[in-house]
Amino acid sequence: MRTRIAYIKLGKKAEFNRTVQERIDDILVNVFGQKKLLKDKKSGTIHVMYFYGFLLVQFGAIDLIWKGIAFDSHLPLGPLYPFFTFSQEIVVLMILAATIWGFYRRYIEKLARLKRGFMAGLVYMFLGGLMTATLLANGMGIIWHGHELTWSEPIASSIAFVFSWLPQGVAAALFFVFWWMHLLFLLAFLVYIPQGKHAHLIAGVANVYLGRNSKVGKLSSIDFEDETQESYGVSKIEEFTQKHLVDLYACVECGRCTSMCPATGTGKLLSPMDLILKMRNHLTEKGAAVTSKTPWLPMFAFNNTRGNQLAMQGAANSEAAATIEYDVKLIGDVITEEEIWACTTCRNCEDQCPVMNEHVEKIVDLRRYLVLTEGQMKPDAQRAITNIERQGNPWGINRKERENWRESQEDIHIPTVKESEKAGEEFEYLFFVGSMGSFDNRSQKIAQSFARVMNIAGIKFAILGNKEKNSGDTPRRIGNEFLFQELARDNIETFKKHNVKKIVTIDPHAFNTFKNEYPEFGLEDVEVYHHTQLLDQWIKEDKLKPTKEVNEVIAYHDSCYLGRYNGIYDQPRDILKSIPGVKLVEATRNHENAMCCGAGGGLMWMEEDTGTRINVARTEQILEAKPTVIGSGCPYCLTMISDGTKAKEVEDRVATLDIVEILEKAL
């Protein structure tokens, strides 16, 4: 592990701001509680059997080693020893059962997310061999020492009974054969651990402890005032933080991330697990070259590996990184641009990862290099960014038309902040409409519906009107951090100018950006709400009373930036449950497992070139629940799912509506 630590130290220093108590809590929940692993009940159960079995069986290993050294002796546990041996046999059986079950799922059932091959099979050989040798050694020990068959060692006693015809001398010899087999399997596995995926036994625990400093919805920022920076983003493996490099060795190779990835699932090149593994292999090779420390031991057994060859030609310190003869490029040779641009930043991968790896931040850092340093991005992404720079919206529509969506709502009061101030009216909420609600014809109906409902509830609100700008979510996720920070500061200045204390928005992307990312740039003492949170609150406060029947079967689609990013799952469903006549059904993938609609990460503005369209795949999943209405709390999601129903030619019988539009029907 020391060589891996040396490689990790090549990265930039990371900040670890969380308290020790928070880190210990994460260890208790995600390591000892196995919380994330148990999301998949079958695989999670297998891993729990391995995890606790392997912890407990170490005491049995010590006992067996003791028997081989001290002959007819064992751990001095007195009258508790029979209970100890009985529990150890149960543990050994549990590990054997988990090994057989795991082998079946990997090689017979051929679970798609699991890698197959020699190295994976080697682990089953280690575990199976270790447990079998333990039982056989104990069985031969009973014959050798002439002990009576006992309830406390039922399996070893059964083995002794079957082979009771063996002479004691032969049994003694066989005991030491199996004793040495046990010891060699154990020592070989200990040597293997740091050099294969089972390094996660150490690195995974460390990774959970080090954990994420910030909220999951917050990306790291770039200090553009730092004149020492020669480039922005990440183009070399050592430009990642040390925490991000720990991620690489912590990977369990369980494939949970890849199995949930919308890009992988629809035939795109991106696989979150392969992304991590390719970076890990790249770090190992470059680390060997830079530090001259071989990644593989014993070295003679790995002479021909790339890592050892690079270690032998390498320099003696990390300053050699710029001159070493290792010309493999992180972007291009290791990770392709196609992979980088396929990510929707939905965080399904991170939500599933049992060792808390951070995939999205790495991908955004790679995008930042391409966009800010190389000036490269997909043409349609460039078009959206240019339009935001010029007009404050991705379509490039004249910024003076931003408040036009309210013109058809003359019968309700939708004042701008300027109009409210001029009339001497106070407003409780600033309704941040967002680019979708302001310019997209379909999304304008959501904004109008929410404005009408706020009027019904007697809520005093105002909009920024033509002063409103893009929230910056799209530029930031695409990789244009400079534009994001410019928009953030402009918006915050506007909020402060008008003494905004509460913001509500129909856009989960803007909601996440304001709530989790703007505070770093000066947004203080401002409450940020998504409209479904307030609608649910107003219903419970009797400000809104849904009494009219809405006889529909509704499947609610969880927005990534509302759900996985901010934990809002119940409020939209509670609103639907409060409406008479509504029957709520769920897609197979829902709540934190819900599949992305395909719009996140700036992909709303980019064409999909490969495989099935993500929005169509997600629509197919939802349609399996046989809804008459697909509900959403996000204008991006609604657009993508609406296009999905059109692609499936069901738009005439399956409507797509925002939660507020459904609620308004009941008022």
Image: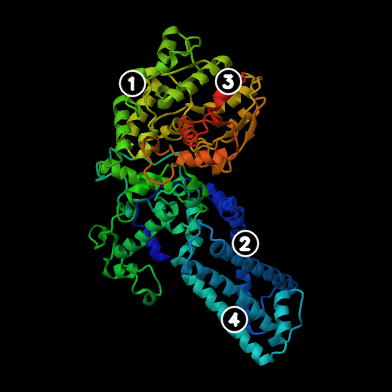
Task: Classify mark 1: residues with Cα within 10 Å, few (<14), some (14-19) or many (20+).
Answer: some
Instruction: State the SS at label 2.
Output: helix
Q: Residue at x 57, y 77 (%)?
A: 182
Residue 432 appears in view: no
Mark 1 = which residue? 399
Q: Earlier in the sequence, mark 4 or mark 2?
A: 2
Q: Earlier in the sequence, mark 4 or mark 3?
A: 4
Q: Residue 467, relative to residue 573: is it above or below? A: above
Nearest to the observer: residue 171 or residue 495: 171
Mark 2 = which residue? 49
Q: Earlier in the sequence, mark 1 or mark 4?
A: 4
Quarter location, residue 320: bottom left
Q: Amino acid at mark 3?
A: Glu
Q: Amino acid at mark 2?
A: Met
Instruction: State the SS at label 1.
Output: helix
Q: Residue at x 52, y 15 (%)?
A: 460
Cα separation between marks 1 and 4: 79 Å
Mark 3 = which residue? 664
Q: Point out residue 357 in the picture as x, y percentages from the top left corner.
A: 46, 51
Q: Amino acid at mark 4?
A: Trp
Task: Report if the CB atoms under discs 1 and 3 are less than 8 Å apart.
Answer: no
Q: Amino acid at mark 1?
A: Arg
